[in-house]
Image (cartoon, grey):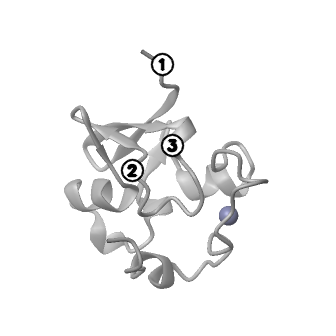
Amino acid sequence: EETEYGYPITCGDSRAVLLFKKFVCPGINVRCVKFNDQLISPKQFVHLAGKATLKDWKRAIRLGGVMLRKMMDSGQIDFYQHNTVCSNTCRSTKFDVLFGNSRVP
Ligand SMILES: [Zn+2]
């Protein structure tokens, strides 16, 4: 079995692991969060943690107590192979556009 590398993340009182190799652009609807042995998307994780009202999943999810948005803006972490795999929707700061994305079934 392949070792899965991940970052411990939190949202409210909920804890999960952000899987490094599954965290691909734009993230929101990608199943890259290991939560109670289930693989879910950041959007689902935020919903399950009861923080969906925060609107911005990158602000709702924290890594080491720091907002994911801050970690990504500062370049401390990024989507997996982001230089080659980019949806071109990640640059938008208009969260509603991403959160309301209904293209993923
Ligand atoms: Zn991107």
- Disc nearer the start of the sequence (1/2): 1
Amino acid type at mark 1: Glu
Distance in Å between CA atoms under marks 2 and 3: 7 Å
Q: Are marks 2 and 3 in contact (CB under 8 Å)?
A: yes
Q: Secondary structure at mark 3?
A: helix
Which numbered disc covers residue 22?
3
**Quarter containing the N terminus:** top left
- Label 1 belongs to which residue? 2
Whole-percent x, y for residue 41 in the image: 36, 54
As drawn, the residue found furthest toward the right would be 83
Which comes sooner in the sequence, label 2 or label 3?
3
Tag 2: amino acid: Arg
Residue at 50 percent across and 60 percent down: it is 58
Q: How many marks?
A: 3
Label 3: how many Cα within 10 Å (few below 14, some 14–19, many 20+): some
Q: Mark 3 or mark 1, which has the lower sequence index?
A: 1
> What x and y, as percent, mark residue 94?
56, 83
In the image, is 84 to the left or to the right of 65? right
Residues tagged 1 and 2 counted as in contact (Cβ below 8 A) = no
Q: Nearer the viewer, residue 30 or 35?
A: 30
41 versus 88 height, above or below: above
* Placement of 101 over or under 75, stated as above or below: below
As drawn, the label of residue 31 is 2
Is the distance from the Cβ of mark 3 to the nearest ligand 1 atom less than 8 Å? no
